[in-house]
Amino acid sequence: MKDQLKELLQHSVIIDKGVALRRTKWMADGIILNKKPEDTRTDEKIYIDTLSGVICEVGVAMLCGSLNEQVFDHKIRDTYAWDVWSRLKRKNRVEVKLHKEEWYTFYPNKVETMIRNIEHHAFDYLVTANYVEEDNYYVVTPRLIIEPKTFKFYSRRSQYAESKTSYYNHRAAVTDGECIKLF
């Protein structure tokens, strides 16, 4: 299945800014209406936090399937735990994450929900993607296809003393066959 997904994600794709902005507004509005009481972010912060991820999700969906159209509800995991339904015959649910640098880096507390979703088998593949902004569009490029069940195994704390981030060691995962590097 990973190889079939790889075939679908071999190219970059152009996303119209209007499409990304409308999807971001729809998703942010759903989060705002259904957010947990402990979520203290402003509506503007939720929108900003949502935009980069949505750009990547729309790009991956254009290449391999369709977007998760369920309205966000933090009480129902299936409404937020995956982003794209792929055209594969099995293992269809894809979670998409922004991946800007050489390594997929993240703050550990920012992926706690994703780790819980992995433990509940809420998605079948994790795809990372990057984008470049142009005047009227974004260019989205998928970067990695990750086996979720091994994500924690290949995740490491950054070696830089001032950094509070962790990273996914895709080089070791690729060697072990648990990840496909696209670009």
Image (cartoon, rainbow, N blue to C red):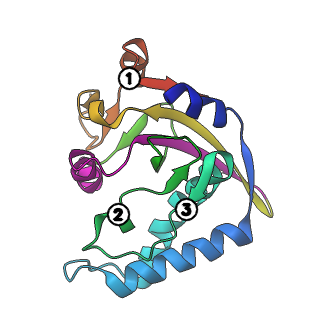
Find residue 123 and report its horizontal and vertical position in percent: 37, 48
Q: Are marks 2 and 1 in contact (CB under 8 Å)?
A: no
Residue at the front extreme of this rendering: 89
- Mark with earlier residue (3, 1): 3
Per the image, the residue denoted by label 2 is 78
Q: Are the residues flagged by discs 3 and 1 in contact, CB closer than 8 Å?
A: no
For the residues bearing labels 2 and 3, Cβ distance under 8 angstroms: no
Q: Which mark is residue 178?
A: 1
Mark 3 element type: helix
Q: Extreme bottom residue here?
A: 33
Q: Which of the two residues, 51 or 161, is positioned nearer the viewer here?
A: 51
Label 3 belongs to which residue?
54
Dot 1 amino acid type: Glu
For label 3, the crowd category at 10 Å Cα-Cα, with few meaning under 14, some 14 to 19 and many 20 or more, is many
Magenta stretch: give its range. 108-134
Q: Position of residue 18 (x, y in %)?
A: 73, 72
Measuring from the top left, give residue 5's x and y in whole percent. 56, 34
Q: Is residue 133 above or below residue 11?
A: below
Q: Is residue 71 magenta?
A: no
